[in-house]
Image: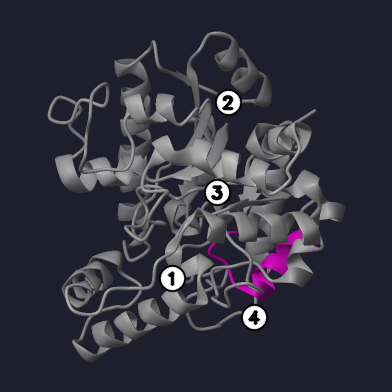
Amino acid sequence: MIDGHNDLPWAMRRHFDGDLDVADLSGSVPEVHTDIPRLRSGGVTGQFWSVYVPSTLPGPTAVSTTLAQIDFVHRMIERYPDDFVLALSASDVESAASTGRIASMLGMEGGHSIDESLSVLRMMFDLGVRYMTLTHNHNVSWADSATDDRVLGGLNDFGRDVVREMNRIGMIVDLSHVSTEVMHQALETSIRPVMFSHSSARSLCDVARNVPDDVLGRLSTNGGVCMVAFVADFLSPAFARWFEESQEMVVAEGGDPRLSADVDAVMARRSRTDPPPTVTVHDVAGHIEHVRDVAGIDHVGIGGDYGGSTLMPADLHDVSTYPLLFETLRTRGWSTPDLDRLRRANILRVMHDNEPS
């Protein structure tokens, strides 16, 4: 199985300052969702590691911090060579599977990481980054975020140049986190398949981070893939209301509802007396099936977002639980060929179709 988005690098930075001597991933690391034993139990054979940095960082600092995150992933691969191998292409992913190692790809989460520079974009590609999410929770100067004020109404001219340059060099355009207008305009601009590395279906849970049906319907023409996230407030309208109320509490206390640290603190306190609604594997399965039904079976994948949220379904609590999802889908009538498309074939095709000919 290939997962589209895992925030282990940032979780390791937050909990352990990125020190692999302090937190040895070859054993149990309960502070995070991901370690090697649980990846093996989960059947993960390919992983896009997010090299996320906060979208509040100023441009030069965002670039240098992203480089530190890239360095962490390279160090992690070098530290555990029997378990991880850097993968720069679809064929590298296939080769990794044949040697029993987990293909490791890198994805930047937010255009702030390039500080308005196509030169930086190209250098990030040379360091192994194979997708970039155009925004994170805040706008960049050239694209609107789903969770910020609409300023541009989509992409400006430089934003379209970013998409075109990503197409040229072979970096996948990732439309998770962007506004609906950016989704449509990027699809109009891109000549290669796009991805949503970790988003769910807006018609089932009406939050800005999810993908509306009119965008999902365009993936069949574009050839792209929507990799469904496991984040509870993307999956359940009841949980999304609880989460929105928590964000309102953050604002009332003078915090920023777009910053995970501020929201997590309020939710932890609130959960003691007012716990959130329960979300399960069946909520995830419903979103996967909706994406399949609207976009087509060739345009759906898995992007759990482990490490990027504390709000995961009760029975999908870490990366060891993927088999439960696939068994659940099998009991709901999924065939083995369709499960194989979901697991890996669809994202491998998108990777291959983004590689320069």
**Alpha carbon separation for disc pair 4 and 3:** 20 Å
Inspect this view and state whether residue 270 appears: yes
Q: Does the magenta stretch include residue 196?
A: no
* Label of residue 132 in the image: 3
Residue type at tag 2:
Leu
Name the N-terminal-most of marks 1 and 3.
3
Rendered position, 97 above or below 23: above
Read off the residue under disc 2: 88
Range of residues picked out in magenta: 175-188
Give the farthest residue toward the right: 221
Q: Is residue 187 magenta?
A: yes
Residue 306 horizontal/vertical position (percent): 40, 47
Read off the residue under disc 1: 138
Read off the residue under disc 4: 153
Q: Which residue is drawn at 73% across and 43% down?
A: 334
Name the N-terminal-most of marks 2 and 1.
2
**Looking at the image, is mark 4 or mark 2 nearer the viewer?**
2
* Quadrant position of the C terminus in the picture: top right
